[in-house]
Amino acid sequence: MNKTLINNLATGIVRWRWAVVIAFAALLALALTGVGKFRIAASADTLLVKDNKLYIQTQVAQQTFNPDEFILLAYEPREHDVFSDQTFSDLSRLQQEIKQIPRVESVTSILTVPLIDSADALSGQTDVSNLTWQKQRYSAARMKELVSGHPIFTDLLINRDNTATSIQIVFKPNPELVKIDQQITAIQAHLLNRKLSEEEQAQLEALKSQAEPLRAALTQTRKQEINQLNEITQPYNQRANTYLGGSYVVGQHLIDIIKSDLVIFGLAIALVVALLLAILFRRVKWVVFPLLSCGLSVTLTIGALGWADLRATVISANFVALQIILTLAVMIHMLGSYRYIAREHSDTEQHKRVELMLKDKLSPCFFASLTTSVGFAALLFSGLEPVISFGLMMLIAMIISQLVSLILFPALLALLPAGSEAQDYGFIRRLLRRSRLQTLNRPGLTIAGTALIFIVLSVGITRLNVENSFIDYFADDTQVHRELAYIDKEFGGTTALDIILTVTDKPDDPSLIISADSVNQLQLVQQAVTAFEATGSVTSLANFTALATQLNNGRPLTEYELTSIYYLLNEKVVNQLVGAYFSEQDQRLRIAIRVQDTTAGLDREQFLNNLRQDLASVGIAADHYQLTSLFVLYQDILSRLFDSQITTLGLVYIALGLVFLAIFRSLKVALIALLPNVLTTLAILGVIGWAGIPLDIMTITIAAIAMGIAVDDTLHFVHGYMAGLKEGGGQAKAAAEEAFKHSGLAILMTTTVIAVGFSLFGFSDFLPSVYFGLLTALAMIMALVADLTLLPALLNKLVATQSAPAQPQGDKANV
């Protein structure tokens, strides 16, 4: 940065300090109006690539078969049997209480479904809707006979071991929202074949805007409903375990976690940072003013995000804590310079001290923030929508943090009276001195030893994997993990996977709803799917035909008998027995599968590949079926992670290399500055591999973000080293002394604050946040080691023109 420009900026900020404060006060007032507009999003499309074709296909299929929005309430008796009067009494009362929730459309359990025990019931001579426990009051023994191993209700209303039952709670849809969603899907469906026109794109955006307040209201309603269900089940927990499951329950838990992480960890980090600042600087003003600036940065950012309608997702839930840490990192470097100036020039007035601080640190702090921004900017090319959104949010946050830390913070300092500064801790100075002497005395050994350690760690990259599940995102002792794991194991899986089959063999007789060949083919597909270890419940029209065969003494129904029964049964019973598995109008069949995420060694990619092979083996051509729903969408995300990691890191390396080259105007110095950070990112990926932690949409951001942050300290150190080299006539000793004295302490303090701040995420209930926090903290410590050992050793050996003899170990000079 031009020296004249720096001098003018430094003078201007100090001179116009009150104008700066007033300007930021005005910005704060504006931002506060946007804070109320800030939103949290946890829907499926926030985790996908924009205009994802698999997501669109899933939406189209859902509109065709119109599956219900439901929550599953599992009931596991502790001391009494599932088939007992106590269970039936509890289920009856639970159903009555649940029906009082305004949006509940129906409540289904083993007490309310038709329990058909003979083929005569399907002949049309019997009202099947009367064959329920509610109407017939079957005995416990008779219920066990009728329900155990039921082709349709097993894994949905009763588990395979007959130790737990469940209630399916179906909710009324919002007709207005359904209509808007249908219009949105109809427009998005064009993306399967072509790009949207400008008019269609405008219509799509308008429809999404109309849907937004309706979705927000629905989210709030769902939260209230889940709370009501928890209150309803509480009295029954004295004699039974109850569990809530369903995608909407998971979505609400994610929203709660995002809100919790935003507030709790933002405040926790602020408190811990305050304590660290008090310990490190021992002055009240160095606690109050940095935290005040951090709070202002966060408020301005939230306001800006609210106005821009950028929403926090699971990935960006930690942006508040992250911004506090990053804003503080810049201010610690500024304070380090200020305190050095205050001690060296104790008789200088406050305005002059701040001006000298700005002249010293404005340029390196600006470029340090720029390099951090490069790390976040690389996330824009990840190809994953939540990661892209996170990168964009953090770019906005970094711009605001730069303005606050480089303009407002110095202006506030200029308002303070000049005072004395506490001396640095002796043990810190001794630690830095030892590091400096080691790099001067044994540069070759330092380079070889440090590089070897980082390379060994990097080998773990070969062990990286992307296998993960929603259940694994939550700590074992959390309610959501217990609920998901239980329902996954006992009620046929958690993650939905649909196979949509196009009926190619149309019946010759137009009066038939489906041909016998199509039913046979459907049964073959269902048998193939059921054979997988990870397959939980599988439901389709084949379950209905299996029930009919079972009731018909093992003789399959003819296509004419099947058609007759289909039309004889009333609509409610057809929906209960066949449900959303057959579209007579479109001649499409749906096989609804739930995959058990808790299956040991589940390889989702291999599962889908094997499924496609099995479908081909039973004669289903690839263009005659679609795989849709959450399992496919989630696997699509996982499959992109490796490519995304390579892309983001590659861009970070190139961009930071170019920034270093522009700053130092030396290819050698730029490469030396880049090397420790490259080794750090490779090492942290290696640690992830060695630890067996799977890559997910949060852990893939660690390397790029850690490098973007850690490179700040590298820049400050190299800046100090090159200044010392210039003043010391090219001597390594003089350069190293200047770098360690001027930047070493600030680097150590910054890393301490950042590492401690990130490590607090280890207390989150959301495991991706735990991994993100702890691994980023570890990456920062690795970067600190590299910056204080490998980096000075490389500079001493390859850049300094005179490698003067190092000081002896007894040297008492300053850091």
Image: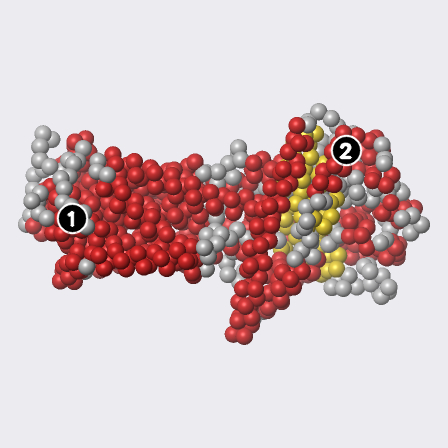
Image quadrant in which the C terminus is located: top left
Nearest the camera: 343 or 587? 343
Q: Which residue is mark 2?
A: 89
Q: Secondary structure at mark 2?
A: helix
Q: Quadrant of residue 339?
A: top left
Characterize the local packing of mark 1: few (<14), some (14-19) or many (20 or more) Cα atoms within 10 angstroms. Answer: many
N-terminal of the two: label 2 or label 1?
2
Residue at (53% x, 71% y) in the render: 202
Amino acid type at image mark 1: Gly
Helix, strand, or loop for circle 1?
A: helix
Coordinates of residue 496 in the picture (x, y in percent): 63, 48
376 over 458 or under it: above or below: below
Q: Residue at x 74, y 37 (%)?
A: 93
Picture colour scheme: secondary structure
Question: Is residue 34 among what the camera can see?
Answer: yes
**Around disc 2, counting alpha carbons within 10 Å, would you say few (fewer than 14), some (14 to 19), or many (20 or more)?**
few
Quarter of the figure with the N terminus: bottom left
Give the side of residue 119 with respect to residue 704, left or right.
right
How many numbered markers are drawn? 2
Q: Is residue 247 left or right of residue 475?
A: right
Q: Amino acid at mark 2?
A: Ser
Q: Nearer the viewer, residue 221 or 515?
A: 221
Label ID, residue 720: 1
Residue that lies at the very extreme toward the right in this rendered image: 125
**In this rendering, which labeled residue sits more in front, label 2 or label 1?**
2
Q: Is residue 652 visible?
A: no
- Cβ–Cβ under 8 Å for marks 2 and 1: no
Q: Could you tell me residue 653's position as x and y percent?
A: 31, 54
Left or right side of 271 for 523: right
Question: Residue 453: image x %, image y %?
Answer: 30, 37
Residue at position x 73%, y 57% in the image:
589
Residue drawn 80% across and 52% down? 572
